[in-house]
Image (cartoon, helix red, strand yellow):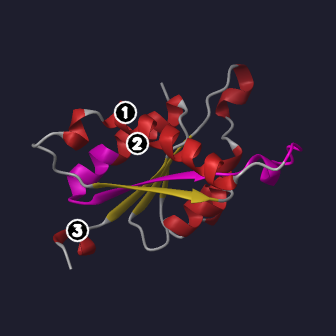
Amino acid sequence: MNAHDSAPRVVVGVDGSPSSHAALRWALRHATLIGGVVDAVGAWEPPSHIGWSAPVVDNSFDREVAEKRFADELDRVLGDRVLGEGRTVEVRRTMVMGDPSDVLLNASRGAELLVVGSHGRSGFSRALLGSVSTRVTQHATCPVVVARAH
């Protein structure tokens, strides 16, 4: 058992959008304040799961591409804050195949907090949340923070 096994978990959804970058930064700051760890969670779905009809492709290829993009996004946002020696927050990375809402709801069970981004829109619809953020705010078993890019 390591020291972080009992630390509060802050789960954050990462999808590569500017709002998920803001959510990741928010989760990192919050985890620093509460002495917690950050579970950065990404979800991927093969094209066949979202109704795209194409020749059968090796799912392991899709997963490799998704994991590479996920790792690149985390590295770009976190930079030296995670890789540097003065790091105070552990960031654990998880990529799961499935619907993003379901993946985040499952990952957040027992967490202190779930942080997601809200895809920004223009005009009147700016007040609306994205489908994933709407679903997790309605069904999560922990508090949820919805971060905007700006």
| Quarter of the figure with residue 111 | bottom left
Q: Vertically, is 62 above or below 106? A: above
Q: Is residue 64 visible?
A: yes
- The kind of secondary structure element at disc 2 is helix
Boundaries of the magenta span: 28-55
Which kind of residue does numbered mark 1 sit on?
Val
- The kind of secondary structure element at disc 1 is helix
Callout 3 touching callout 2 (CB < 8 Å): no
Q: Vertically, is 142 above or below 150? A: below
Residue 63 inside the magenta-drawn segment: no
**Residue linked to disc 1:** 77
Measuring from the top left, give residue 50's x and y in whole percent: 80, 49
| Quarter of the figure with residue 75 | top left
**Mark 3 burial class by Cα count in 10 Å: few <14, some 14-19, many 20+:** few
Q: Is residue 147 visible?
A: no
| Quarter of the figure with residue 35 | bottom left
Q: State the residue lying farthest toward the left.
A: 86
| Disc number lying in front (2 or 1) | 1
Check the picture and name the quadrant holding the N terminus: bottom left
